Image (tube, rainbow, N blue to C red):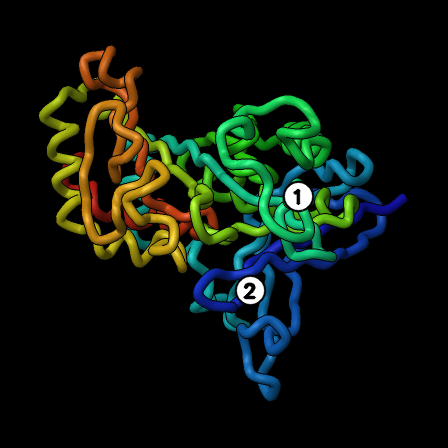
Amino acid sequence: MHTTYEYVWLDGYFPEPSIRSKVRVEKGTPAHAPLWGFDGSSTNQAEGLDSDCLLSPVKEYTNPFSNPNDKLVLCEVLNPDGTAHNTNTRNILKSDCGQNLKDQEWWFGFEQEYVLIDPTTGRPLGFPEDGYPKPQGDFYCGVGAENVAGREIVDTHLEYCWDAGIEITGTNAEVMIGQWEYQCFGHGIDATDDLWMSRYILYKIAESYDTSVTLHPKPVLGDWNGSGMHTNFSTTKMRDNGGKELIKDICNALDKNHKEHIKAYGSNNHLRLTGLHETQHIDEFSWGDSDRGASVRVPVHTINNNYNGYLEDRRPGSNADPYKIVGALVKTLQLCHS
């Protein structure tokens, strides 16, 4: 009998990391995946003359691609001496804001948009080889072969994530054909871990359909919606002892730190945040009740609960690193929760 551990980690490429993986086989059924090494010179995380890096397991998931004993293993990258590697963005949430994440019981809901790509044409599924499909309108939450493309990948991804132990709370076809969204919900650092692993599962499923996935925030230029990752967030104070004044304080703090947040919210986001297609311009900050053209939306659930609840940050791009998003939010809003 043996157990396979599929190690998953983020490489050192910039401005956003790619996901890497490799498989380790152990005899029997060990309690946990062990520390393991890899060649960092092949992932932009080390020089060839000193290339050893370490994979430190931080969370194990049931492997939905294999038998129940096998695991997907999310890892942090460490230097040979055991310190956090400089590409280890997860370490931000432990070193800089970990205590606040726990004290205020932060919850996050990531609305991960993505586009399925035909690798033979480089165009979204559902696009003709030349030209464009009909204008946007029928595709959002659409039904029928003329309005959706790739649903089998989406449905499989939903089931596999639940099998792995990742809480996906919904999926839907988005405004452009071939564009989809799923919502990944969780508590504190677990939410960010689950989002990364859900991306990995999506890439693997798409492989089996000879399909690519792009998280580029504007994969098709012109009058087509971009892809974002709206980030819903709440704390104990926002949920239980909020009110409009706290919402104002939070949004004012986000406004003052807008430029720093934009730096953490993904590359090429200026192509999406134009002030069109339900976005605020990247150089502007605004917030409002039920306003999908604002930087931050106050959802109707929060409004109807006397402004107790959550907020939706609509600025992050679909390619953003959730560790950086959460790090920026917690850093900016710590004073509002002191």
- Residue 163 in the image, given as x and y percentages of width and height: 69, 29
Q: Residue furthest right?
A: 1
Q: Which residue is mark 1?
A: 125
Q: Quadrant of the C terminus?
A: top left
Image height of 82 relative to 28, above or below: below
Q: Residue at x 36, y 32 (%)?
A: 232
Q: Residues within 10 Å of mark 2 (few under 14, many from 20)?
A: many
Element at badge 1? loop
Q: Residue at x 51, y 72 (%)?
A: 81
**Residue type at the position of mark 1:** Leu
- Residue 264 in the image, given as x and y percentages of width and height: 34, 55
Image height of 119 relative to 169, above or below: below
- Give the spatial CA distance, label 2 vs label 1: 28 Å
Closer to viewer: mark 2 or mark 1 = 1
Image height of 159 relative to 323, above or below: above
Would residue 100 be visible to someone looking at this image? yes
Direction from residue 256 to residue 96 in the image, left or right: right
Element at badge 2? loop
- Residue 219 in the image, given as x and y percentages of width and height: 51, 52
Which of the 4 quarters of the picture holds residue 155?
Answer: top right
**Residue type at the position of mark 2:** Asp
Closer-to-camera residue (280/157):
280
Q: Which residue is mark 2?
A: 11
Q: Quadrant of the N terminus?
A: top right
